[in-house]
Image (tube, rainbow, N blue to C red):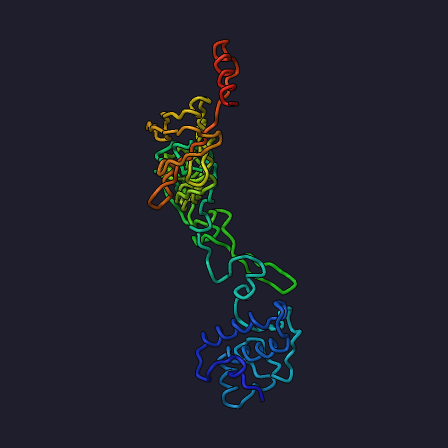
Amino acid sequence: MKDYYEILGISKDASSEEIKKAFYKLAHKYHPDKGGDAEKFKEINEAYQVLSNPQKRAQYDKFGRVFEGAEAGGSGFNQGFGGFNWQESPFGFSSVNFDFSDIFSDFFGGATASKKKDFTNQNKGRDIEINLEISLEEAAFGGKKEISFKTYVACEHCQGKGYEPDSKLKTCFYCKGEGVVRETQRTFLGSFTQIIDCPKCRGKGRIPEKPCRVCGGDGRYYGNKNLQIEIPVGARNGELIKIRREGEAGKFGAMAGDLYLRVKIKPHSVFERKNDDLFATLYISFPEAALGTKKEIETLDKKKIILKIPAGTDSGSIFRIRGKGIKHLNQAGQGDLYVEIKIKTPDKLSSQARELLEKLQKELKN
């Protein structure tokens, strides 16, 4: 003979709550519509119908069975074991007394009938990502920057509440203050009760006598948002900067989303950045390359340094200046500056310059 306690995996002194939890767990696992074992689910359902009903459980504990025709508090289970019919309902268990949406809510994506939706999370503002175009200097040294973008912003007039400052709130007549209403839907699995936001109070449970004249009652409106942001030292191209609670404003004063700034560094007229190193080109004349020279160059931070170029330097030679690149992001140290030498050939020559170059050419041949 079947042991219903063993089928549900519970002890004989299990509480009604423990019985219910055990059934929920096994129903999730073995329900045929979720790829489970139909016969096993039938067995689990049969055990639950008996043990969840105090009268039937008492009869089962005493006699080891529930007799034909034995009524149990009007639950509708009156066939006994021999008359049990798997096809009795679209679910395969006609008299289980609990909210089916607790088990099948994942099939429909809705809230369960026994759980009220979280109003705050439901009306939370969305996260926003925008491009932040900055100069190479701003990326290297950081600093503050004013930005402006369009999004939903909190209404200053009502401070995000959605109603006039002097307005009174009254309990919603439609949902009686719960903020949600229950809708019953018929599906191929049977009837399901689903919780939705109250269409009258939009989930708040209370209705203002005077909605906000600026935002119309949403607690927010679509407009320009001006913000001063902090650019981190060493920011890199393509990097995301997260600013908490500066995204889209939530409805009815709910939490705002986050703002993500995608860094876009504008091209520089002198320097090119590779990781945290800077690269620049310095043009010198042929005599300077041949004889050697000293050149004053300006670094990204506008400081002047002297670069010594030795005699006989070839075009394309690269000189490394340590520590004059970009500071590493969130760590000590910084990159280097690389200066590539290019020999510039004059477009026009005076007669005297041409004569001197011709003499030099003859000299170099000898």
For this orientation, the residue located farthest to the top is 351
* Total marks in image: 0
Residue 157 in view: no
User: Height in image: 258 above or below 110?
Assistant: above
Residue 98: percent from left, percent from top: 52, 69
Residue 184 in view: yes
147 or 316: nearer the viewer: 316
299 or 40: nearer the viewer: 299
Q: Using residue 257 as the reference point, say whether residue 40 is left or right of it.
A: right
Quarter of the image where one finds residue 44: bottom right
Quarter of the image where one finds residue 96: bottom right
Residue that appears at 54% across and 74% down? 26
Q: Using residue 306 as the reference point, say whether residue 72 is left or right of it.
A: right
Residue 181: percent from left, percent from top: 50, 55
Quarter of the image where one finds residue 311: top left
Q: In which quarter of the image is the N terminus?
A: bottom right
For this orientation, the residue located farthest to the front is 366
User: Height in image: 268 above or below 121?
Assistant: above
Residue 125: percent from left, percent from top: 45, 44
User: Height in image: 114 above or below 339?
Assistant: below
155 or 290: nearer the viewer: 290
Residue 292: percent from left, percent from top: 40, 26
Residue that appears at 49% across and 16% down? 359
